């Protein structure tokens, strides 16, 4: 009889563990994982997204894509982003692709990408600087 109790306890504990694991997986797909992207200057002030358009026009400069799940959508150029985000050089094709953005070209300010947590580096807070062109 004690053998049967042990097996029942194992089944119950195993089912509880699977339930917790499934809940953890579902949490990874939550809206908290959505990153909002803005084109910013070196001071984390939002600039026109054309400054981060890597279309080869030679405009260049020290511009970055800043992103965070904490950034609100709809912020306008001139607004300063709150602390706590990450950024990478506007023309870093590898990072753009990693975060689900096109490797080159235009991305709109306020673009939201879902399920990007764990997609390789968070970019660095200091970002990679590029003189462009």
Image (cartoon, rainbow, N blue to C red):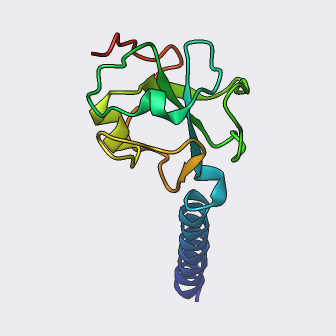
Of 65 and 76, nearer the camera is 76
Of 114 and 11, nearer the camera is 114
Q: Position of residue 128 (x, y in %)?
A: 39, 15
Number of on-image labels: 0
Asked if residue 124 lies left or right of residue 96, the reply is right
Of 125 and 101, nearer the camera is 101
In this rendering, is residue 93 above or below 17?
above
Q: Residue at x 72, y 23 (%)?
A: 80
Q: Position of residue 32 (x, y in %)?
A: 66, 52
In this rendering, is residue 30 above or below 126?
below
Q: Quadrant of residue 10?
A: bottom right
Asked if residue 18 lies left or right of residue 61, the reply is right
Q: Residue at x 71, y 39 (%)?
A: 75
Q: Position of residue 109 (x, y in %)?
A: 57, 41
Q: Position of residue 73 (x, y in %)?
A: 69, 47
Q: From where the camera sits, is residue 77 visible?
A: yes
Q: From where the camera sits, is residue 123 visible?
A: no
Quarter holding the N terminus? Answer: bottom right
In this rendering, is residue 18 above or below 64?
below
In this rendering, is residue 122 above or below 18?
above
Q: Residue at x 48, y 24 (%)?
A: 64
Q: Residue at x 42, y 13 (%)?
A: 61
Quarter holding the C terminus? Answer: top left
Q: Quadrant of residue 79?
A: top right
């Amino acid at each position: 009889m004690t053998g049967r109790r042990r097996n029942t306890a194992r089944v119950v504990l195993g089912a509880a563990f699977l339930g917790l694991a499934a809940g953890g997986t579902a949490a990874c797909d939550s809206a908290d994982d959505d990153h909002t992207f803005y084109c910013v200057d070196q001071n984390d002030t939002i600039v026109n997204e054309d400054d981060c358009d890597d279309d080869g026009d030679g405009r260049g400069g020290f511009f970055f894509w800043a992103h965070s799940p904490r950034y609100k959508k709809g912020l306008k150029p001139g607004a300063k982003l709150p602390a706590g985000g990450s950024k990478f050089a506007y023309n870093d094709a590898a990072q753009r692709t990693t975060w689900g953005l096109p490797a080159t070209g235009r991305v709109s300010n306020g673009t939201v990408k879902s399920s990007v947590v764990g997609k390789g580096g968070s970019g660095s807070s200091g970002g990679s600087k590029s003189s462009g062109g």
